Amino acid sequence: MPENWKGGVLRAIAGAAGGAPAAAVYDGTADLQLVYNGGRFVPAGPMAALPALWNLFERVEAGEIELGEPLPGAPMSWEDAARAVCGGGVEAVNALISALGMEAVNAAARRAGMEQTEIRRPVGENESLRSNVTCAEDAAAFFRRLLSHEGLSEASCRRLLALMSESRDGGKFASVGEKCLARFGASFPGSEYDAGVLCPDGKRPVVAAALVMLQPDREKGARFCRRVAEAVCGEDGEA
């Protein structure tokens, strides 16, 4: 990573302009390199989908589910649901969690390294700490396990990362272009999140998560996420 990437992340945090920012960065599959409010609970919003995706691929590996089969109660296949989830579809998130079962998804969260994440109810527009919760460390840990093929087969990890590489809306982590290998973002009232795999030098991947809650200005929240990615990738900007 760039020599002063930590300074860039800290500047992004300092410049968050309100809200409650949190960040966590791993140098590839190595130890946590930087954490700020990493364990602070935040409303999960669509990030509740991460343990659901993990559980889906666990069941595919166990032979319980075929990705091409219809998702119960929804007009799509399991694979189409996973793709819609990675594209930010809240209805698909709820359909996937409902079909898998909330208890199973919460158990999968622990196996995915998401020790503090808890899914209690369907994802809605008015998310709060009284509903589903997660944290920056959990979001980063999820991607770290995918990167190290820990808990799922290499094929499943690669497939999940591929699904998360299809979203290229140009915002937040995607602002660094090809240096963003895979990402999963969420945007809902008061919160802007992004997490994923970045590759600053084209060789060694980095796992990062940037989450901000209590931020009524969506643009400022998105800018915080973008600046974390830019700092990690050596494109630290002040705009």
Image: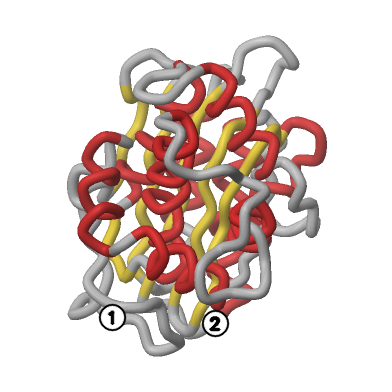
- Outermost residue on the bottom side: it is 126
214 to 235, vertically: above or below: below
Q: Is residue 223 visible?
A: no
Q: Residue at x 59, y 55 (%)?
A: 78
Q: CA distance from mark 1 to mark 2?
A: 17 Å
Q: Residue at x 32, y 70 (%)?
A: 43
- On the image, the x and y values in percent for residue 162 come to 69, 35
Q: Residue at x 37, y 49 (%)?
A: 51
In the rendered structure, find residue 140 and report the number of the disc placed on it: none
Q: Residue at x 21, y 59 (%)?
A: 103
Say which residue label 1 marks: 128
194 to 129, vertically: above or below: above
Say few, some or many: other residues with alpha carbon within 10 Å of mark 1 (under 14 / 14 to 19 / 20 or more).
some
Which kind of residue does numbered mark 2 sit on?
Answer: Asp
- On the image, the x and y values in percent for residue 99 come to 41, 65
Kindly state the secondary structure of the residue where label 1 is placed.
loop
In the rendered structure, find residue 217 and report the number of the disc placed on it: 2
Compared across the picture, whether 220 is left or right of 238 comes to left
